[in-house]
Image: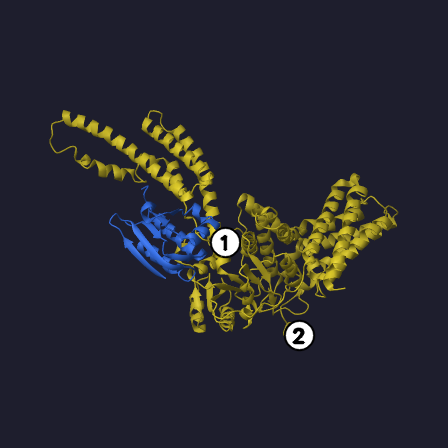
Chain colours: A blue, B yellow
Amino acid sequence: MEITVERRDDGLVVVHPAGRLNMVTAGDLRELIASTITAENAHVVVDLSAVSFIDSSGLGALINGLKSAREAGGDLRIAAPNDQVRLVLQLTNLERVLTPYGTVDSAFADV
Amino acid sequence: MTRLASLRVIVVLTAILGINYIAWRWFFSLNWDAWWIAVPLVAAETYSFIDALMFGMTMWRARARQLPPTPARGLAVDVFITTYDEDVGLVVKTATKARDISYPHSTWVLDDGARSDLADAIAGVGVGYLTRGGSWNGKPLHAKAGNLNNALMVTSGEFILVLDADQAAEARILDETLGYFENEQVALVQTPQFFGNVGPRDPFGSQAPLFYGPIQQGKDGWNAAFFCGSNAVLRREALMQLGVTGYVDEVERSILTALKGATKVISRAAHGAPRENETLQLALQEVLRNVHQTRSDIRDGRPIAAATYKLQRAIAVISESMVALDMQLLAKDLAAIAEMVPASAGGGDYLRDLDLTVATLASRELSPLGAVESVQTLLRSLDVVRADQAQPIMPLATISVTEDMATSMRLQSLGWSTVYHNEILATGLAPEDLGTMLKQRLRWAQGTIQVMLRQNPLVQKGLTVAQRIMYFSTMWSYLSGFAAVVYFAAPIVFLVFGVLPVATTAWLFFLQFLPFMIANQVMFLIAGKGNPTWRGQQYSLALFPVWIKATVSAAANVYFGRPLAFVVTPKSRQDAQPQVRLVIPQLLVAGALVTASTIGLLRVLLGIGEPVGTLVNLLWVAFDLVILSVLVPAVRYRGRTSTEGEH
């Protein structure tokens, strides 16, 4: 799985994982998010548009990312999931904590 | 007739005879004049009958599974060996056996003791070594469940074999069990726990041939095979799903609780704040309004993260505007002062950068709102990341000191299946002295009762009725201590005081009681497939002080937060304490039974006692003494000798 990180001028960090976000790759994403977040850049959007499949370990990595972001005084939000990802978010009820936004730009529109 | 068919016949027979007997006892033979012993006795008998009924239901579907297909190649498997303080040599031996399991896998020793000598020794074996990370500092450790949860976060195998530190695995353990997972619904394959250091006499009843055999097979028939903490293979996806759904439930619960508490606390703070401080009063009202809004948003099913984030922002804005207002008033005052005092050394310097000052003062620690402790508490508790825990995701249940049963129950309520594979594939070490054995039984009982009280299976959503009963039945059986006390007390009461709890003739009593009793014992006999089950029945009554202590302490823990005084079962023999002191309550009971028998005989000789009733109660005393006699070899046991246990 490939993961790229984009730091926008407004301080927003956008993480773009691509491929299967499962038990094999979840650890990479978790570590990358944890090491990317700083006190100044604690607002993170995970762009899921290129994620073809996610399992519960993948969701776990997102929850761990949320923890890192909140502890640094920011937040982590997710954007543009495909149908499979949406379904998993629904089945586990995780959508109530990590609500998917339609696009990366709309994720932090309220801030 | 097949074994299963004859078993079902005897189960039905036991049920019919039992219902007849219990109904007769409640409605036609209860001696209400002596209700203080009669009612406890009939309650104890009803308890035992329900126990037998649920056992019969367990046996209804007890059968061996067909062997699974040979597992596909290339599955990723992690083998976890959990250890806390076991002997380094023992862990090394177990790790070596685990390393040599033939199906390709990674082996990890999960050392909760973080011992450097073990780390060195494990490096020599050539397997992985894990300890808790720094994130666990100052957080609840959750014993073995926490140890496993920690390891799940730093490994990635699709399947996980869990082994206790003393469980030496057969090389083929994975080849025999992984095939079940071709069924994508299967989350767990449990194999028996068997002990190699126990001779055929097994004084402590360590081998559980009835449980690791017919009972687990029966539960398996209802898709309710239990996870028993070791010698089991688990599917990571199922555990992680448990972790994720558990996380969401926990977050929602804690936030609703926090908001409810916050409403109360903030109202009180507003009450206590100085009336003349109108800014503060208004601000607190505004915070309250926002808290109410957030609560109703979450209850309506709105996303929790967004709702709480909105609330935190709202409180920040209120706080900021409050500071701004104060600063403006202050600035006005200073301006007025400046007008009066001729400009000398730039008296308004502090306020040159008003925006920066406001921002600084509005940060959580410094703002006047933040000074109100209640709001700070609220901000902290609005936590969607379980900051009180080392990691937000806890796949293995942490509600009990025995994480295994609660975990499999939650897996099944999410719709996963479990499998019991009835073949010994690992050999461990049983306690070698009475004290250790009693501690182990106490811990199991406490854990089981904790789960019953915290997560009563009878009301768990997602479980079938049969699954609920299968879990409840195991919990129910741990309440036997109270029944045992009544079974010991009733004959004593008759022999000493001549008070009979049953109002009937001896002839009629036996006519009602014996058929049920015989059917019940035959049921155990057939279910046990010739395995020795009598010792288990003896221990379920003879260890009554352990079961009562477990029930009382677990209830005190669940309802009043009292600690359980958790102990890890030592794997090596504890010689220090004299064994007899461990069974003082049982010795007192045995003494009372013998004394009562003497008194009863004297009463008959003196013409006060009733001969037939006395005879019946003497037989009862004999039965009680046979039950308690299981402890005699246990107390006398001095460890393995060369003649026993080596095979």
Which badge, 2 or 1, is on the more N-terminal residue?
A: 1
Which element type, helix, strand or loop, lies under badge 2?
loop
Question: Dot 2: within a 10 Å radius of its alpha carbon, few (fewer than 14), some, or many (20 or more) residues?
Answer: few
Q: Which residue is mark 2?
A: B643
Amino acid identity at mark 1: Leu
Please determine whether, in this image, residue B526 is positioned above or below residue B392.
below
Q: Residue at x 30, y 38 (%)?
A: B366
User: Chain for mark 1?
Assistant: B
Snapshot quadrant of residue B179: bottom right
Marks 2 and 1 share the same chain: yes
Return the residue nearer the eye: B502 or B636: B502
Residue highlighted by disc 1: B242
Q: CA distance from mark 2 to mark 1?
A: 48 Å
Residue B639 in the image, given as x and y percentages of width and height: 62, 68
Q: How many marks?
A: 2
Answer above or below: position of B159 versus B14: below
Using the rendered image of the protein, determine whether residue A37 is visible from the camera's viewpoint.
no
Residue at point 34%, 48% (across, down):
A103
Quadrant occupied by the C terminus of chain B: bottom right
